[in-house]
Amino acid sequence: MNGLMLVARREILTQIRTRAFVIGLLVTAVLVGALTYAPKLFDRPDTYALGTVDSEQLPLQAAAPEAEFEWRSFPDEAAARAAVLAGDVDAVLVDGTKVLTDGELDGELGLLLQSVNREVRLGAAGVSIPPLQVESVGADARYQSARTGIAVVLVIVLFMLLLGQAMMVAMGVVEEKGSRIVEILLSTLRPWQLLGGKIIGLGVLGLINMVTILAVGLGAASVSGLAEDFPPGIAGLVTAVLVWFVLGYAFFATLAAAFASLVSRQEELGSVTTPLTMVIMATYFVAFYATNEPTGTLATVMSYVPPFSSMVMPVRMAATEVPLWQAGASMAGMVVAVVAVLAFGAKVYERAVLRTGARVKLGEVLRAT
Amino acid sequence: MLEISELRKRFGGGPDAPGGKVALDGVSFAVRPGELFGFVGANGAGKTTTMRIVMGVLQADSGTVTWQGRPLARDDRQRFGYMPEERGLYQKMRVAEQVEYFGRLHGMSAVAARKATDDLLERLGVAERRNDTVQALSLGNQQRVQLAVALVHDPQVLVLDEPFSGLDPIAVDALAAALQERCRGGVPVIFSSHQLELVERLCDSVGIVAAGRMVATGAVDDLRAAEGDTLRVVVRDPAPGWADGLPGTVTVTGARHILRTTDGDDQEILRRAVKAGHVEHFGVERPTLTEIFKEAVA
């Protein structure tokens, strides 16, 4: 156990002090912050400039709380016409009966003016009409755009971190095998300690990245006010994403280490890890597709199939409501897959990592007794 | 005492696929505490394979390695120091951190590992490079760090594969001194080398391995004595046919005739030589390790 922790500690300390890690972390943080801030910057509320001539201002604000209204009054109609033509105001209400515009009236503003005017007149006549109650019989769609946005960001972050950290593990394995340092290490450590320590160490670094991204994202969202649009249960989602990251990472990193242990040179790494990279890419594409159709058959089915579930299920959880039992079942399936991959990876690694020189064939390793 | 007996190893092939290459065909030898054991042999003779089996990074097909009478276990190897043939260090890790890391992997506490590292880097003359990355060092200095990695945990046995290759004469002396010091401390040291003069100078005993078999093993002096002394006589301008009937071989270089023999009556040979011409040299020579080696692997 001590050996395992020493190896993990070395991985963390070595990486965390490199310029690449620090810069990478800063750049990700800035990017995520900017991404989170952006919608509020570009998504300004509608603002209407309105005027009156011998009229009361209509209570438009109460009818449209999202929009902003600026009112000014003009001494006579001629002044109002000039202001409309100059573009200073969108519309002017004259004598409470007429609206002056330059060309066609903005559709939304027109509807608003007409209905509020009607309401005010009816109210004055002693008639009040209760507003229609809207009830959605489908899924709660209030947060749909926020949910989709979160899902898209999640799938990109998960993909980059899973692929990046798995490749770091692969490069680390080849570094040790290629330089034969593995011979010294394995004369005092057991293979599982070396392999496990490396996976844990680089996993912790991945988690540091993940937590930074989530913290910066949520922080920026609450400062910018974007968080108000977030659906309830964000804390649960964050926890689930961290767990899914750990599971997905354990799966892909172990396979990366096993394949990497077959070769002795970094140049050979690409060819030997291609199948794994393809699986990660495929997982990413399915998950990205699922952000658009989180309730579709593909997303639903794939959210149970390891290792696709490691990205598709968090996407579904972000993009729509997923019953707890479904998330649990999918997670249980992934845990089983991770355990199987760990057993497989440890066996391949142990048998291949000391066989330096030419590329070792996977079949040969598995056949050996 | 470290005892290696009847190690056999075949690469490739297997029970269901006969063939493959025999790397070791029954290698046996023993190294006592405080003994510096030189392991020599041609390339591919089986030195590295033997050392890797001793260090447990390779499994023998059969044969045993025992330490103090017991089969070698993982806990014993924790206290071995090893230098593999192809140097292995983390290129991007700092020197002192790296040596310390290996000390801790061998079970030392953080404090003990740091102290041992400081002492060792000082003694090996790389203390001022302690905070440099390994890749910034010259080959010779990297080799010193490699040795520090093998020595940091005060090993009870040292196994070094070609520790002297690629070193300049000054570095060779520094390394040799470090090994002899460990030996005096009672540590058995096995090292392989192609520099036979060096092995001859340093080692108490040697093992000569050829084609996976130990063809000669023992104290250097014993091997030389066993090979027998050679009488060498150099005569200038001798009468033709002067050596007829004498044992040994005669080689002629210019006016000089050189007679080499391991038996015969030396006084009789001298009398014949004096009669035949001008005797420039008459003496008994012991074979060098190089000669023994060439003889043994021929």
Image: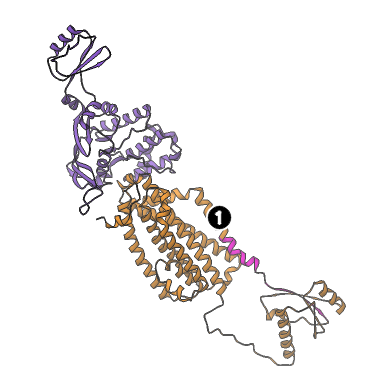
Position of residue B85 in the picture relative to residue A317 (left or right): left
Nearer the observer, A261 or B111: A261
User: Residue A221 versus residue A144: which sits nearer the camera?
Assistant: A144
Whether the magenta-drawn stretch holds residue B5 is answered as no
Residue A295 position (above or below residue A220): below
**Residue placed at 53% from the left, 79% from the top?**
A140
Q: Position of residue B288 (x, y in %)?
A: 24, 24
Q: Is residue A231 left or right of residue A6?
A: right
| Position in image of residue A222 (x %, y %) | 58, 66
Quarter of the figure with the C terminus of chain A? bottom left
From the rendered image, report the letter of the chain displayed in orange. Answer: A
Seen in the image, is A170 located left or right of residue B212? Answer: right
Query: What residue does disc 1 label?
Result: A27
Residue at screen point 75% across, 82% down:
A58
Bin the neighbour count of mark 1 within 10 Å (Cα to Cα): few under 14, some 14-19, many 20 and up: few
Tell which residue pokes out farthest to the front in this image. Answer: B240
The outermost residue toward the bottom is A126
Q: Measured along the vertical axis of the image, is residue A169 above or below residue B274?
A: below
Q: Position of residue B232 (x, y in %)?
A: 20, 16
Q: Quadrant of residue B158?
A: top left
- Residue bounds of the magenta highlight: A32-53
Give whichever of B47, A246 is nearer the camera. B47
Q: Chain of mark 1?
A: A
Which tint was used for chain B? purple
Instruction: Please tell me whether residue A218 is drawn above or below residue A59 in the rendered image.
Output: above
Query: Would residue A76 be seen by someone viewing this image from the given angle?
Result: no
Report the amino acid beneath label 1. Answer: Val
Q: Is residue B251 visible?
A: yes
